[in-house]
Amino acid sequence: MVFKYIVVAMLVLILISLGKALFHLSSGKTDNGAKLVKALAWRIGLSVALFVLLLVAYYSGWIEPRHMGLSYSQ
């Protein structure tokens, strides 16, 4: 159950970082380029970290795929 909260928290942080990047992109100041790049770098880093966390959790057995019982028989 804690793992779900970690994943949701990371997704929220990714969205916040993306929002910060959008804010710096849309503001008219000329010195916001470095802030924009930093926000996007954080988003990429968090996304990669989330992907690695999901891979580690899957191979460690912390999470399992759910089979919905769909039948593909002809």
Image (cartoon, rainbow, N blue to C red):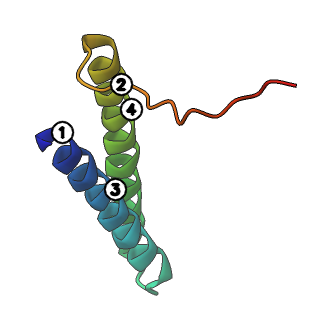
Q: Disc 1 to disc 4, how far (Cα)?
A: 13 Å
Residue density around tag 3, few if under 14, some if 14–19, many if 20 or more, within 10 Å: many
Q: Disc 4 to disc 3, how far (Cα)?
A: 12 Å
Q: Disc 1 to disc 3, how far (Cα)?
A: 17 Å
- Check the image and report above or below for 66 versus 39: above
Residue 36 in the image: state x and y as whole percent. 40, 63
Picture quarter containing residue 15?
bottom left
Q: Determine which residue is flagged by label 1.
A: 3
Picture quarter containing residue 12?
bottom left
Name the outermost residue toward the bottom: 28
Closer to the N terminus: mark 2 or mark 4? 4
Identify the residue at horizontal 48%, vertical 74% (top origin): 25
Are discs 4 and 3 less than 8 Å apart at CB? no
Which amino acid, mark 4? Phe
Residue 38 in the image: state x and y as whole percent. 33, 54
Q: Determine which residue is flagged by label 4.
A: 51
Which amino acid, mark 1? Phe
Identify the residue at horizontal 29%, vertical 18% (top origin): 56
Q: Is mark 2 on a helix, strand or loop?
A: loop
